[in-house]
Structures are given as C-alpha cells and as structure tokens.
Amino acid sequence: MLYFGIRGCTILIDSTCVCVCVCVCVCVCVCVCVCVCVCVCVCVCVCVCPRMLVIYAESWLTVPRAWGADVRSIPSDWLWADCCLFPIGPGEHLRLCPQDYTCCSSQMEETLSLQSERDYLKAIEDTSQFLSTTFTQRHRKFDEFFKEIIDLSEKSMNQMFTTTYGRLFTQNVRVFQELFSELRKYYSGGSVSLSEVLSDFWSSLVELVFSLVNPQYQFNDDYLECVTKHAEQLQPFGDMPRKLRVQVSRAFIAARALSQGLATGRDIVNKATKLSAGSECARALMRQWYCPLCRGVPTLRPCHSLCLNVMKGCLANQADLDTEWNNFVDALYQVSEKLEGPFNMELAAESISVKVSEAIMHMQENSVSISAKVFQGCGSPRPAPARSKRSPKEPGGSRKPFRTYSPEEKPTTAAGTNLDRLVTELKERLRPMRGFWVSLPHTICNDEKMAADVSNDDRCWNGQTRGRYLPEVTGDGLVSQINNPEVEVDIARPDVRTRQLIGELRVAANKLRHAQAGQDTDFMDSEEGSGSGGGDRGERYNDDWPGYGPNSPPYSQPPRSPSSIPAKKTRVRERNGSKWNKNNGHGRARSESCRLTFSPLFLLSLMVAVSPFWR
C-alpha cells in the first residue's frame, strides 16, 4: 500500500490495480496490431492465391475429381489454395467452361479436360470388367474341361480294349489314335469334317475287323477296298456308326461353338471398350465434371440427367451393339442348355468306346454271314500260309466276352468340376449381360462419384450453375442423338469399328444357332454340294430324340441280296476320301452308281424335251 499526503489528504494507491490497468492497455495495443496484420494477410492472399491455385491444381492429377476426392489424398500444399475456391476473376479465356468468374487458367482448364477423358475411359473399363473377366475365365475353364474329356475318353478306350482284346488292340491302336487326334483337331478349330473323320475311322475298322475274324485268309489292299465298298449294303456294324456319328457330331459341334463363342465375346468386349473420347465428347465431359471446380463449387456433382445425356452422346455407337449383343448372349445361353441335355459332351465322349465295342461285337457275332456275302461279291480270297506247328496262345490274344462299361458317376476333371456345374455357372453370368451396352450410361451415372442422385435434382451442377437440369434425356443409339443438348453427334457417320463388331456378333450368333441343331456352318456349304447327304444337320434317332426330323434318312431299308453285289474291280485305293456315308456309315458307291446309271436317261429325256425347238 502506498500513502500520499497532499495538503492534508491521504491518497491510498493499490499496486494490484496498477497491474490490471497496464495489462488492459497492452492487450488493446496487441489486438489493434493483430487486426492490422490480418487485413494485410487477406490482401496478400487475394493477390497471390490465383497463381498458387494454378500451380497446385496442375500438379494434382492423382485425384479423380475435385469434388469426389478424399481429403487425405490431397497434397498438403493444396491447402494453401483453399482460400481460392471461389470465383476470383473473369473467365473470358475459358474455352470449355462457362465464361463467368473462375478460378481456372487456360492451362488448368486443358489439364482438367485431359483428366476428364481419363476418368471416362477408366469408368468404362471398370464397368465392363465383369464381362471381360467372365468371358476370359469361362473360356479357359470350358476349354480345359473339353480337352480333358477327350483325353479321358481315349484313355478309357485304351484300358477297356486292352483288357478285352489284348495284343489285337495294341497292335492296331493306330486306328483309334488317329480318331482321337482328328477329334482334338476339330475341337481346336481345325479344318476337319467330323463326318469324314468318322467315315475314315469306320472304313479302317471294317477292314481291320474283317481281317481279324478271317485269320485263315490273306487280304491285299484291293480286296479290303472291295470289302469297304460293299459294307454299305452289308452293314457289318449294325446301326452303331450312325448313332455314334449323330451323338458325337452334335456334342462336338456344340462344344466347339460354345468355346469359340466365349472367345469371341471376350475379344468383342476388349475391342468395344478400347475407345477414345472425341472432341465433342471431351468438351461435354469437362463441362460436367470439372467446370464446377473452376466455378468455385468443387463438391457440386453434375445432375443425373446431365450425366445421362453426356454418356449417351459419348457412347452412341456402343449402344447400337445392343440388339446383336443380346442375340449373341441368348445363343450362348441356349447352346449351354443343349450341353446339359441331348448334346452332353461328357456322355458323347464316354460313349465312343462303348459304341465302338458294340459295333465290333456285332460284326463278330455275324462274321460268318458277312464273310460269305463278301466272298460272293469280291471273290474268294487267298488262303493264308499254313503254320508248321501250332503256335502258342498269345497272352490276351484270345477273344474274351465283351464287358460293358457303365461309369457310375460323371468325372470331375482337372478343370475342377463337371459339365453340369460349369454350364450352371455360365448361365448365371450370362443373364445380367443382356442389355449391357444400352444400360452402360445408366450404370456409370448411377455411381455417386460420377453424378448426383436422381432425387437431388435441385442441388446439382446443371452445366452452368447450381440448379435443376431442364433438357430431356435423349434416347439410346446413334440416331437418337440428333437432338442431344450436350454432345454434338454426327449421326450420318457411324463408327466403322462398331459396325465391324456388329458383323462379328451376327456371325457368331448365327453359328451358335446352327450348333443348337447339330449343324456346323464351317462345313455346311461344302457338304451340301458334295452329294453326301447334306452334312451333319441335326439328325435324330428314336432312342434319344422325340421323333424323326425332316432330314432323317430311311434307315429301315433292307440290305441288297448277295447276287446284286458287283464283282471285284481293280482300282486305286482312295485313302483320303470319305467312304462311309452319313446314313448308315458306308461309302459313296451307291451315289456314284446311281449317277452313272441315270445320266444317260437324263440326257435322253433332255433331248426329247428340247427336240421341238430344233424344228
């Protein structure tokens, strides 16, 4: 306490009060200084930030869209430019965005335009990834499965025939190896006719079995050729050649068509999604995605209808794929269903060894009558040289009773599953593929990072500012874009590559549809012109098809009598020709003889018909 006396008055001064007064004065001075400093800083920021915004925006290309980016992914230096996310200058220099007040320079606008194209292509790639992955993986699994089924069928035949026929089979295994080699070549896309493959197999087999059931005779190539030619009437294997041909042909045709169809789908998806944004599309993409950033509203998403118009304009040609694409997907689905039922590849491959064994047994059981008819038509063969002493019985060389083969369950191969499960998985993935190209704009715009929700049409970017988007959404396809308000599309100039893809889809769907009927389009023209019976055209037979079709031949025709069999003729052996026709498994001798017999009659009738015109 301090005491001062002034003319008899005592003044009491408290030191605490003095300190408080001093502090108040200091605080007032500090506040005044801070306010002055803040004002100076604001002025500096207004002058400097436009340049900072351009610098940092040009280096910030890892963020897909400013309004959709994660704040943690933004470089720390970007925060210096936060004060500039509002219009700070006129935009007369802008080419793509509205020329109002803007944060963007010309260079920044160009950089963001390139980024919008990358975002667009990435969105298409991500959306179509399901298609590409499905076709690639399903093709690989089916291809592995079908190839292993063929290997298992050959292995099964080797085991069964080795047990049944012993050395007789192992010494002549080449005939069967050639059959499976040609089947593999056909499935892999080789220029191989299944009809000719099976014809050559049965021709070789009848010569082999005929020699084995008549070991007391010696046959040269000419004699065996005569046996093959006469087998058409004799039918030494019964009805097995026809049954095997129908079952194997339709299964292999469907399997190859499905495998090739999946590969075609994979290639078409890859081609259709490897596109570039045209100049008009790029302008529209920039206007909807990055112009809000330049306008100072980076979190404002484009209106849903605006996004649809932009995407429909940019993807107008892809939408035209939709009709043929749906036909292609439907054809794949139907072929896969056939593989579950009458065109089952597993059952067809397993039946090869069974039906061949039944055919051999049929010829063995009827060898006496068959040999007698052949001897009468082809002449008496030369007896084999007599042995000096009885040869010991060869191990496994005697005829053993035929042992039927009936697998207890469908095999599960290295592909990881059986055919039914593979087909079921494929059909589940094919269903959502329909309408993919038409729905692609909707799929992209339904992404919350790409556009505002359809219910938020009042608080979105309409291309100019915040507000409702008024223009109507255009239709699908190139022609419908004539009045697109966002993308100027030349409807008179369709994309050449897209038209090529439409053609590829049409060809693939047509091949799949023919495969459903057991027809192979790769060989239809050549076989129809060869006079060999019309090719593998979906023939039916009673034990697994409900009735006969219009292409089914009359199999009930009885064989000709032995007296009608012509005598043996010496001729060059045709090893490469198809000697077993499609009706009952034998050669074309009948068609050739009919052609020689009726040609003179045809010429005579032609002369009579045209004789009035000579007068």
Image (spheres, grey):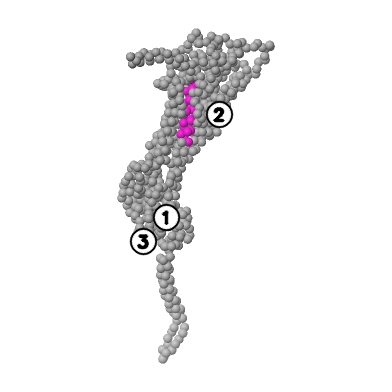
Residues marked 3 and 1 touching at CB (< 8 Å): no
Mark 2 to mark 1: distance in Å? Answer: 59 Å
Please identify the quarter of the rendering in which residue 606 is found: top left
Q: Is residue 598 left or right of residue 576?
A: left
Q: Is residue 409 left or right of residue 330?
A: right
Q: In the rendered view, tell whether residue 11 sits above or below residue 469.
A: below
Q: Amino acid at mark 1?
A: Glu
Instruction: Compare residues 311 and 531 and report the one nearer the observer.
Output: 531
Residue furthest right in the image: 389
- The picture places residue 224, in percent across and down from the top left corner, at 56, 15
* 119 part of magenta stretch: no
- The picture places residue 431, in percent across and down from the top left corner, at 42, 36
Q: Amino acid at mark 2?
A: Asp
Q: Which residue is mark 1?
A: 110
The secondary element bearing badge 1 is classed as helix
Residue at the spot 34% in from the left edge and 52% down from the top edge: 462
Q: Which residues are magenta?
A: 241-263
Q: Amino acid at mark 3?
A: Pro
Residue 15 disc label: none
